[in-house]
């Protein structure tokens, strides 16, 4: 597996590409769109006009969603172990996973995923060549915010944006504030987000 560790603001943002997702994009998209039809309401988190599934997508009986969950778990834990310099037997849990479907005009407000340790997203269906929204940002980009709140003269790059491709996967610390720029395409923008927990941290709190 090839992955890039993009250090922004001194924080690791890990990026890789899931070829399995690209190969199964259309079927995955249809499956998630069907899921939305079956549960129209969804839940409210950072989503603005967009649809957010329940947080336990990995419990789906659908074989394709089960495969996606396995891919996210296996690759996500590899990336986290590498970033944290954890041993191979470090217990890491996929604690939540959900689908995001953004229709025309939908976006996700700034948010973080605490108290989880690591979070991420994999892109199922996106416009790989979106319109520019100005300032180097494109429609539907994911933006990350500098966690150190000091003035621009000291740290001029206060945000960084990524334009995802189909199959792109990003993994980042859960405290890192991020948002999704408005999506202005008629075709829905579909992604699956997730959170990881470090088992020993949960056990330490429980003691």
Image (cartoon, grey):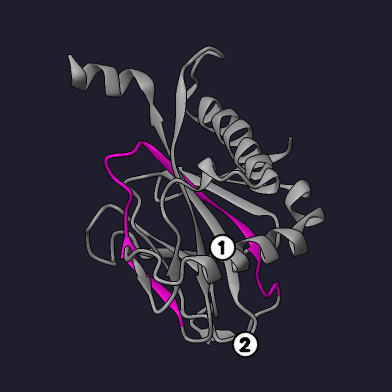
Q: Residue at x 78, y 48 (%)?
A: 19
Foreground mark, 2 or 1, reads: 1
Q: Is residue 66 above or below residue 143?
A: above
Density class for disc 2 (Cα within 10 Å; few <14, some 14-19, many ≥20) is few
Instruction: Judge from the rendering whether residue 102 lies leftward or rightward of residue 9; answer left or right.
Output: right
Q: Can you tell which quarter of the image residue 1 is in?
A: top right
Q: Is residue 146 above or below residue 106?
A: above
Residue 48 location in percent, x, y?
36, 76
Q: Nearer the viewer, residue 25 or 27?
A: 27
Residue 49 location in percent, x, y?
40, 79
Q: Residue at x 55, y 30 (%)?
A: 77
Could you tell me which secondary element the residue under label 1 belongs to? helix
Q: Is residue 116 magenta?
A: yes
Q: Residue at x 62, y 31 (%)?
A: 74
Q: Nearer the viewer, residue 196 or 140?
A: 196
Q: Are marks 2 and 1 in contact (CB under 8 Å)?
A: no
Residue 188 location in percent, x, y?
60, 77
Q: Quadrant of the C terminus?
A: top left
Instruction: Judge from the rendering whether residue 38 lies leftward or rightward of residue 55; answer left or right.
Output: right
Density class for disc 1 (Cα within 10 Å; few <14, some 14-19, many ≥20) is some
Q: Which residues are magenta?
A: 106-128
Q: Which residue is mark 1?
A: 35
Q: Which residue is mark 2?
A: 186
Residue at the outermost front position: 38
Residue 186 in sight in this render: yes
Residue 54 location in percent, x, y?
42, 55
Residue 157 in sight in this render: no
Mark earlier in primary sequence (2, 1): 1
């Amino acid at each position: 597996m090839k992955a890039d560790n993009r250090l922004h603001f001194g924080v690791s943002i890990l990026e890789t590409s899931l070829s399995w997702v690209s190969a199964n994009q259309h079927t995955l998209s249809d499956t998630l769109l069907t899921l939305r039809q079956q549960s129209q309401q969804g839940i409210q988190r950072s989503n603005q006009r967009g649809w957010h599934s329940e947080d336990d997508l990995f419990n789906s009986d659908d074989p394709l969603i089960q495969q996606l969950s396995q891919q996210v778990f296996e690759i996500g834990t590899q990336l986290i172990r590498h970033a944290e310099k954890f041993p191979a037997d470090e217990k890491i849990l996929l604690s939540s996973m959900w689908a995001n479907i953004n229709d025309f005009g939908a976006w996700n407000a700034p948010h973080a995923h605490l108290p989880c340790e690591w979070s991420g997203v994999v892109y199922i269906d996106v416009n790989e060549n979106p319109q520019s929204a100005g300032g180097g940002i494109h429609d539907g980009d994911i933006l990350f915010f500098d966690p150190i709140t000091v003035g621009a003269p000291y740290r001029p790059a206060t945000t960084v944006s990524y334009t995802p491709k189909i199959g792109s996967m990003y993994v980042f610390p859960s405290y890192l504030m991020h948002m999704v720029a408005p999506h202005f395409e008629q075709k829905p923008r579909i992604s699956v987000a997730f959170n990881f927990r470090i088992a020993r941290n949960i056990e330490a709190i429980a003691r």
